[in-house]
Amino acid sequence: MQYGQELNGCLSEWHSPADDAGRPACEGRFEMMPLEDIYSDWSRELTLHHEPADSRLHAFKVVDLAYTEVCVGHYHDAAQDPGLYVFRPAEGEKPYPLHLDLRGYVQLLAQSLGYADWQLALLQLLPDDGVNPAHRLGTDFLAEFRQAMSAWNPDFNYDTFVALYQAMRLENYRPSGLQLSGTV
């Protein structure tokens, strides 16, 4: 409710070209959805037509429509899972837990400036469980993220970013939307 009263939607998009100082071209985007959009039916936008009618994915609600192929949301169902998940439906992946609630996500979003796929930098801090989409990308993304953020934002410190993530992670969190062999 506090989100709906104070923010209730916000869009930011930026692009930076490569420059003579050696800074790489990069981009960022976030689109925090208004409450009425969050709690609407996302089945068509997430291309869930192939999912059975009783699939839990139909209860997935998008909070941040970062890019058309990457979004962050939560399950709005009886499990009452407080955590947010990163979801790349076009990749055929299931939503993957970020181990953050909305408050933690917004604080890290502010640190990352919405850098493209910044959520995957968080996932690379989690153990490789064989499902985590960030680990299938390799380490190139993390190095690119660190370099670009440090080059374009002098206030960005990767170690501070990691410490904030660790501090904001939900304690004793058991994601309801993912079945893993071990714990994360």
Image: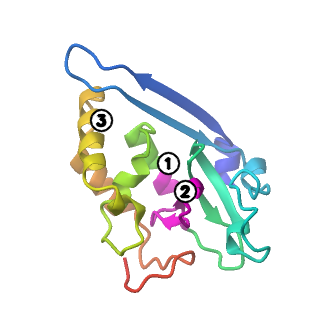
Residue at 32% across / 60% down in the picture? 124
- The number of numbered badges drawn on the structure is 3
> Is 97 or 49 nearer to us in this picture?
49
Quarter placement of the C terminus: bottom left
The secondary structure type at the circle numbered 1 is: helix
- Compare marks 1 and 3 and give the one earlier in the sequence: 1
Magenta region includes residue 87:
yes
Residue 45 lies, with reference to residue 175, above or below; the image says above
Residue placed at 48% from the left, 80% from the top?
Answer: 174
Position in image of residue 31 (x %, y %): 60, 40
Label 1, label 3: how far apart the Cα atoms are: 17 Å
> Decide: marks 1, 2 in contact (CB < 8 A)?
yes
Q: How is the image coloured?
A: rainbow
The furthest residue to the top = 20
Residue beneath disc 2: 102
- Marks 2 and 3 sit apart, C-alpha to C-alpha, by 22 Å
Residue 159 position, x and y percent, is 22, 50
**Which quarter of the figure is the N terminus placed in?**
bottom right
> Element at badge 2?
helix
Q: Quadrant of residue 43?
A: bottom right
- Which residue does the numbered mark 1 point to in the structure image? 106
Judge the density around disc 3: few (<14), some (14-19), many (≥20) Cα neighbours within 10 Å.
Answer: many
Q: Position of residue 8 (x, y in %)?
A: 68, 43
What residue lies at 57% left-to-right and 75% top-to-bottom? Answer: 177
**Circle 2/circle 3 CB separation < 8 Å:** no
Mark 2 belongs to which amino acid? Leu
Say few, some or many: other residues with alpha carbon within 10 Å of mark 1 (under 14 / 14 to 19 / 20 or more). some
Tell me the residue that label 3 is attached to.
149
Q: Quick one: 81 or 137, which is closer to the camera?
A: 137
Magenta stretch, residue numbers: 83-105
Residue 15 x %, y %: 44, 24
Q: CA distance from mark 1 to mark 2?
A: 6 Å
